[in-house]
Image: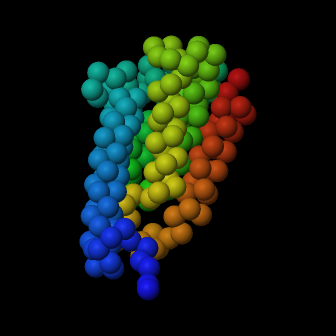
Amino acid sequence: MTTSRTSGGGRAGGAVRYASVARGVDAGLLLLRLVVGLTMAAHGVQKLFGWFGGPGLGPTGQFFAANGYPAGRTMALVAGLAETLGGLGLALGLLTPLAAAALIGTMINALGLRWGSGFFVPQGVEYEVVLLAVFGALALTGPGRWSVDRFLPGLRAHPRLAYGVAALVLGVAVGLVVLLVLRR
């Protein structure tokens, strides 16, 4: 008697179920990437250009300077670019681990600014913690098959876990350097 790793239906039934699960995972990752990526990109262009009711680069730079960052306008530019390009990268599934790392670093700083205000919004850090988890999960899982990364030879068959862990380390390290070393 042979046993199958699939539940019922033998090999053919298991392959069909696996393909259905894989499509569901890809659809779920696409939805997550689009919503979170485009939201972060919109947040970034608020900082850069004042679009969508945002303050623009000048007032955002003043905010950064008031919160102890040197060269507030430069830091606002860096944060705005990280959010815009990282968000678009996630939405497209383009260089996904690197896009996630950019957003992780930015969110580490947002978390640092709000730390000590409790966990729950409106003053707390729950939103930043949830976003950090989303970015970390996307770095580790990869973007799914419905992504630009799938068509890039170096990323199509990349070791997801290794690249994901490297992205997590990079994002956290850069975020902490900016927060702890550059911020006064």
Residue 26 is at least partly visible in this image = no
Residue 12 is at least partly visible in this image = yes
At a point 41% along the width and 77% down the height, the residue shown is 4
Q: Is residue 182 above or below residue 101?
A: above
Q: In the displayed structure, does residue 134 sit left or right of residue 147? A: right
At a point 58% along the width and 34% down the height, the residue shown is 108
Count numbered badges in the picture. Answer: 0
Q: Is residue 128 above or below residue 118?
A: below
Q: Is residue 20 above or below residue 181?
A: below
Q: Quadrant of residue 81?
A: top left
At a point 32% along the width and 78% down the height, the residue shown is 10
Q: Quadrant of the C terminus?
A: top right
In the image, residue 153 lies at what x, y percent? 42, 76
Q: In the displayed structure, does residue 156 sit left or right of residue 159? A: left
In the image, residue 59 lies at what x, y percent? 44, 19
In the image, residue 121 lies at what x, y percent? 47, 16
